Amino acid sequence: MPWLPLDPVLLRLGLYIKIDHGWMEHPFVRNVFTVSSPTEIAIIRKYRLTKLLYDPELSHADVVEAITNPTGPVHEFEIDAETAQDAEADEASILKEKHRQIQSALDHRKAIDENWRTYTNAANEVSVMMAMANAGQADMLHSAEKILSAMTGVVEQGEVALSLVCAESRPEPGQELAMQGINVSALATLTAKTLGLSAEDIAHVGMGGLFHNIGMSRVPLAVRVKSEEDLSPTETKLLRMYPQLGKEILEAISGVPEAVVEIVYQHREYLDGTGFPKRLINGDIAKTARLVGTIVEYNLIASDQRSARYMGPAQALSYVYTQLKNKFGPDVVEPFIATVTVFPPGSFVELSDGSFGLVIKSNMQERLRPVVMLYERQASHDQPAIIDLARERSISIEKALDPKGLPERVKDALLTTKLQGYVITGK
């Protein structure tokens, strides 16, 4: 039911209200909440917040009936002297929490900027590394090990989080290959930790993810920039050669672990024999390759907005579970889903107060309460509000939303790019 206008005189305990003023015009942490204390009414009056709305369905039924009864007299809620005095203390407490949230949002925004710099630097290094690999230069291994050492160093910490990185513009095709490698490597490294793999296997998985698409650099650009639906049979056959091409590139370089080559070569194979390039089955496919393959499929579905298969991260996870679990095996699919959580970074969500948000950071300790960037009508969306649901307990996520059905103004406000990336951070 839509919000209805509320005469401030009718403000009562039990009403679920929206303060239709800017967030900085009042001391409350949220613009939407259920009035639960007379001191809240006193504070609303003190700040002369007259633009009020209420939701009859989420308000207490008896209160709604009382304020909508046309025959009853209208009396303003009375605030006695004791309540007015208590309101001053409550206001101070609310303002303290609001200031804490403002600082928290500033800290998150600083982290977003730092993560983007880290991601951009890594993408540049991976682009150079791919060029060196194509030239057969063994020194490219030093670049790969440097990137992976930083990543595994964070993963070895007690608590880690997966954070979303938003690119400012769509990269060149060569740069996009590097970003895809970083994304897959980050997710694969985290999932390998969930699986309890050895340090050596985690390193192989990370490097396999980083190199998984290196063979794409030898596929004609005109082919690889197309979505799968637009490829001719000949182009599809050519595109599906990239794992073989990747294998050939890496085998020509001294020092690349055989397990990494195996991942690159096998990551698009399925247990039922319908994958490529060799149509391997069951035990012929390495578990680490199936793990990386699961993440590659997820990343393609969740990030390639050119494709008809594109869906949001939460929907992509559901697809991976229902459609790909038996192709890659539940022994890798289920740990991957457990790692990225129910609402992965990049998911659009609807919150319990009716607002929209974009998940920007996971919370491994409370998987249903990530850090969310909010869309609010009054907000200045060059600086959207950011809240940590693990601390802000008054609201929660109701459901994940399909980005295809969201208004463009919401997507534009929260996600100003068509490319998403991930970095692993310590808590």
Image (cartoon, rainbow, N blue to C red):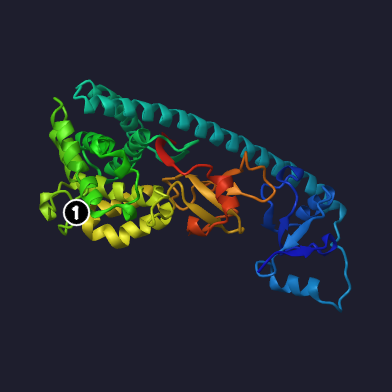
Residue 319: x %, y % from top left: 34, 59
Tell me if residue 202 can be seen. no
- Which residue is found at the position 82% from the left and 64% from the top? 10
Residue 72: x %, y % from top left: 86, 76
Residue 371: x %, y % from top left: 51, 45
- Which residue is found at the position 27% from the left and 26% from the top? 131
- Residue type marked 1: Gly
For the N terminus, give its image quadrant: bottom right
* 262, above or below 232, in the image: above
For the C terminus, give its image quadrant: top left
State the residue position of label 1. Answer: 275
Q: Is residue 182 left or right of residue 411?
A: left
Q: Is the residue marked by circle 1 packed among few (<14), some (14-19), or many (20+) residues within 10 Å?
A: some
Residue 416: x %, y % from top left: 54, 42
Q: Of 228 and 90, which appears nearest the observer?
A: 228
* 301, above or below 203, in the image: below
- Which residue is found at the position 33% from the left and 55% from the top? 229
* 254, above or below 94, in the image: above
Q: Is residue 20 left or right of residue 152?
A: right
Considering every residue shown, the one lying at the far left of the view is 284
